[in-house]
């Protein structure tokens, strides 16, 4: 695929749902694994307590979204064989109104050396000439987490049913100074001053890290000398999200928006608390791409949360059809693993609109 360096037209995002397992103590774990239940399917799906508005797949384990050519695409990490974590693929559903959804075949599943042990969360960007590209984390044969990309096989297909993984993957790998088993969840890219940028979440000991990568051509990525942001004593950053908000209006902004009336939001999911935390601050791309937390905001466990309930691993995307930013988040809705298997499902996606009022995000 040929990439260009023109101005970005529109962004799309795939929600981030980092379901991490441990294998021989190598990959860091945040989920309890039930091997004997991973492929056990319910004979019938119980409708009791299933949502009537928020998105759920027809059955089994769910654990995000994009707008492209008039259609909303929801990609989500999914177990096609059971209602507990395991057998994860990138499932794919489409809608014209984000209420009525049609399930398609999975878009991405483990198939290559750079993702043979898992295709985990990521994001996507629509490049100039209206070309969408997905970033996602793959688990390689060494159980290292590497960043890959995929592109649609046929751009004329309005549903973008099939995706291919180019041979030059992976495009981002952790260097020897970094934690290679805790390095995941690439964000939507943004472009300012001739360089694309994206963030990959990680940790260094107990310091949460938002590593910054830059590229001129969208294929060769180089780690910046300094991270976009880091916070001590938080544990692992997961599902980082970095996006602009307007101080002068109530419309959403695409990820490349920048100027005197723009602030930026940095959101991270913390696996030690299983909550979503955010700050609002100033972004200085001309000064080492520095993000400075705004006055009155607190990093870490004492900071502001998106939600105080069962809500995690959220991602936003810009909807250019209505100039709004939409937040999707994962609500587990799980009982015990045995109960989930019996009822035939676990989890749903919650959709919210985002606005800025009095320097606080309104959901």
Image (cartoon, helix red, strand yellow):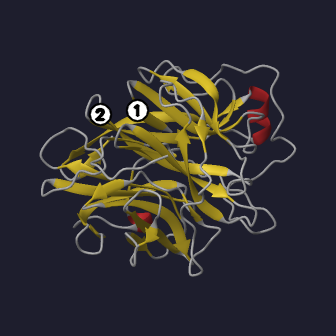
Tell me which residue sits at (28%, 51%) in the image. 256
Q: Quadrant location of residue 286?
A: bottom left
> Does 132 sit left or right of 87 as displayed?
left
Residue 145 visible to an observer of this rendering: yes
Residue occupied by mark 2: 320
Residue 123: where, in percent of width, then height? 48, 48
Label 2 residue SS: loop
Tell me which residue sits at (24%, 49%) in the image. 245
Residue 340: where, in percent of width, then height? 74, 34
Location of residue 62 with respect to 56 vertically, above or below: below
Q: Quadrant location of residue 319?
A: top left
Q: Residues within 10 Å of mark 2 (few under 14, many from 20)?
A: some
Residue lying farthest to the right in this orientation = 36
Residue 36 vs residue 221, the one in the foreground: 221
> Does 156 sit left or right of 129 as displayed?
right
Residue occupied by mark 1: 67
Residue 152: where, in percent of width, then height? 53, 37
Residue 306: where, in percent of width, then height? 40, 49
Mark 2 / mark 1, whichever is N-terminal: 1
Residue 37 vs residue 228, the one in the foreground: 228
Residue lying farthest to the front in this orientation = 2
**Label pair 2/1, CB-CB below 8 angstroms:** yes
Q: Residues within 10 Å of mark 1 (few under 14, many from 20)?
A: many
Residue 313 visible to an observer of this rendering: no
Location of residue 102 with respect to 355 vertically, above or below: above
Residue lying farthest to the bottom in this orientation = 177
Total labels drawn: 2
Label 1 residue SS: strand
Q: CA distance from mark 2 to mark 1?
A: 8 Å
Tell me which residue sits at (73%, 33%) in the image. 80
Q: Quadrant location of the C terminus?
A: top left
């Amino acid at each position: 695929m040929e990439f260009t360096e023109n101005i970005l037209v529109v962004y799309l995002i795939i929600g981030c749902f980092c379901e991490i397992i441990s294998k021989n103590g190598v990959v860091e774990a945040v989920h309890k694994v039930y091997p004997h239940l991973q492929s056990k399917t319910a004979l019938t799906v119980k409708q009791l307590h299933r949502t009537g508005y928020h998105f759920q797949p027809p059955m089994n384990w769910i654990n995000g979204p994009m707008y492209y050519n008039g259609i909303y695409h929801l990609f989500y990490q999914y177990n096609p064989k059971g209602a507990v974590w395991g057998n994860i693929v990138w499932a794919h559903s489409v809608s014209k109104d984000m209420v009525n959804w049609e399930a398609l075949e999975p878009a991405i599943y483990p198939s290559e050396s750079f993702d043979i042990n898992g295709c985990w969360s990521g994001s996507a960007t629509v490049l100039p000439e209206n070309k969408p590209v997905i970033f996602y984390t793959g688990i390689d044969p060494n159980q290292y987490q590497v960043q890959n990309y995929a592109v649609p096989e046929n751009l004329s297909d309005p549903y973008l049913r099939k995706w291919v993984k180019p041979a030059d993957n992976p495009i981002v790998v952790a260097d020897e100074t970094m934690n290679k088993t805790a390095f995941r969840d690439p964000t939507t890219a943004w472009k300012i001053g001739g360089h694309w940028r994206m963030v990959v979440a990680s940790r260094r000991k107990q310091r949460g890290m938002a590593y910054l990568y830059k590229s001129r051509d969208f294929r060769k990525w180089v780690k910046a000398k300094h991270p976009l942001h880091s916070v001590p004593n938080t544990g692992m950053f997961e599902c980082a999200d970095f996006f602009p908000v307007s101080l002068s209006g109530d419309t959403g902004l695409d990820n490349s928006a920048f100027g005197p009336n723009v602030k930026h939001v940095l959101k991270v999911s913390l696996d030690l608390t299983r909550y979503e935390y955010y700050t609002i601050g100033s972004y200085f791309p001309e000064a080492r791409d520095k993000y400075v937390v705004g006055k009155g905001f607190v990093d870490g466990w004492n900071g502001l949360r998106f939600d105080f309930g069962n809500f995690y691993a959220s991602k936003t995307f810009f909807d250019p059809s209505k100039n709004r930013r939409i937040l999707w988040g994962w609500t587990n809705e799980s009982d015990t693993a045995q109960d989930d298997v019996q009822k035939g499902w676990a989890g749903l996606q919650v959709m919210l609109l985002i606005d800025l009022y009095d320097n606080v995000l309104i959901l």
